Image: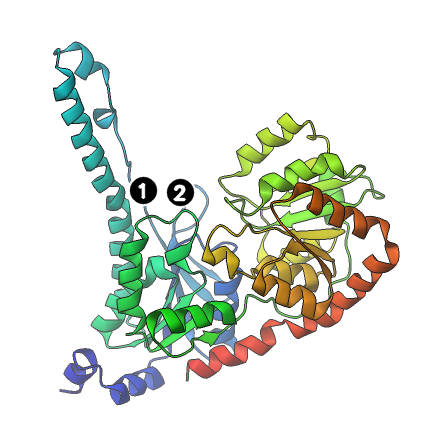
Amino acid sequence: MSWFKRVFLRDPTLIRERTQVNNKVCMVVWNTFETDARVTKEATTLITKGKKDVTVIAVHQPGRTKHREQVKGINVIRVDRTFKKTSDSFKSGSTNERTVKPQSLNTISKKQKLKKRIFKLLIFVPKLIINSRFLLEAYRQDAGIYHAHDLNTFIPVFIASRLRGAKLVYDAHEVSTDRAGWGNKWFWEKVESFLIKRADRVITTNLTRGEFFRDHYKISLPYIIRNVPKHVDIEPTNLIRESLHIPNHTPVVLYQGGMQRDRGLENIVKTVKYVPNTAFVFLGNGQLKPKLIELANNEGVTDRVYFLDAVANDQLLYYTSSATIGLQLLINTCFNHYSACSNKLHEYLMAGIPVVASDLPEIRRVVKDTETGILVNPENVQEIAGAIKKLLSEVDLYQTFKLNTKSGAFQYKWEDDEKILLELYQ
């Protein structure tokens, strides 16, 4: 009877009792869990200070990741998402269609429309497959608490938590319903609206986003757990220059993180020709990388634009500390960007380098509070170039900002936010 009340009636007392005797936490994230700083910090805190047994279910990348491994005490399970979305049989205007049997334009048009509809349906198949695998692995964990990282994992984690009669935590890293590159937003808004009201705890990354979720879905203000690093004293290194053979006297302007759309990366490349005698370094990976390399070639600045692959989280700040200036140039193309304040901004401060950053609410809050950089319009190349040159030429201003990074890093540190995480897990 108690099982029935817990699973089907969601009796809060019985669910709370389950979390007290079942210390397993199952997290699900839609990436390979190689460089996800936020998930790593949360999992590590729950293991070391919350005395939890944490499993992270992630995505397997053939040839690069392991299906199962343990990373810093975190049990990692990666599921396959391999599925060929298209085949020759669905290519419009294939040889067979054109040569085997003559057809009228009207017939061809109908077939093309049918193929487009089929293709649209097939796009959902890989997502259905990986969500099914997420659900199966999550259910197998038989955890006391299930933790969904972002909206794209919410459905399978919600189902697993219901089948197991366990507590559900929703961690919205992004505002996915108003995010660049997301399709079918109306559908996902319906999904999020339904599920977020049924989560036992809701987390997001800053107050602007917290107020959005509260007002949009008529829920209590979510817990705010910021994208901030653990506090460490980082001595400056020369890793970037050594890795790329950049002369020691050359300033290094750094962008670190995913190379994705609407992050101002093209404008960084376009800025290079206006800032002489300076190296611009992109540290990370992403689908935009080939286009940035091509753009640097077209702009004639390949001799001063460098690319480094992503490095492990525990090594990142040592690379960051070898730069002169850090860039965070998100473009205001959606509410998700408007409300963002990502890891990289705080990592720059922790590593002791001043910043040039977008003048957006949460980014502005950090830069103004800490007095560690210059705010710019990320779509204005001349303004970006001017801010960089100002920092490089005005030594006193640069040193003031650099000195302020120390207190700024202490103001925005994980040790404060992990207390909130431990509290909401009680």
Vertical comparison of 15 with 297: above or below? below
Q: Position of residue 98 (x, y in %)?
A: 19, 13
- Contact between marks 2 and 1 (CB within 8 A): the answer is yes
Q: Is residue 180 left or right of residue 166?
A: right
| Disc sitting over residue 62 in the figure | 2
Identify the image quadrant of the N terminus: bottom left
* Residue located at (24% from left, 19% from top): 93
Give how far apart the Cα atoms at labels 2 and 1 are: 9 Å
* Residue located at (21% from left, 71% from top): 163
In the image, which is nearer the foreground, mark 2 or mark 1? 1
Q: Is residue 232 visible?
A: no
Q: Position of residue 201 (x, y in %)?
A: 37, 77
Picture quarter containing residue 152?
bottom left
* Number of residues whose C-alpha sits closer than 10 Å to that of mark 1, classed few (under 14), some (14–19) or many (20 or more): few
Please, what is the three-letter code of the amino acid marked with disc 2? Pro
Identify the image quadrant of the C terminus: bottom left
Please, what is the three-letter code of the amino acid marked with disc 1? Thr
Q: Which residue is mark 1?
A: 82
Q: Is residue 426 left or right of residue 341?
A: left
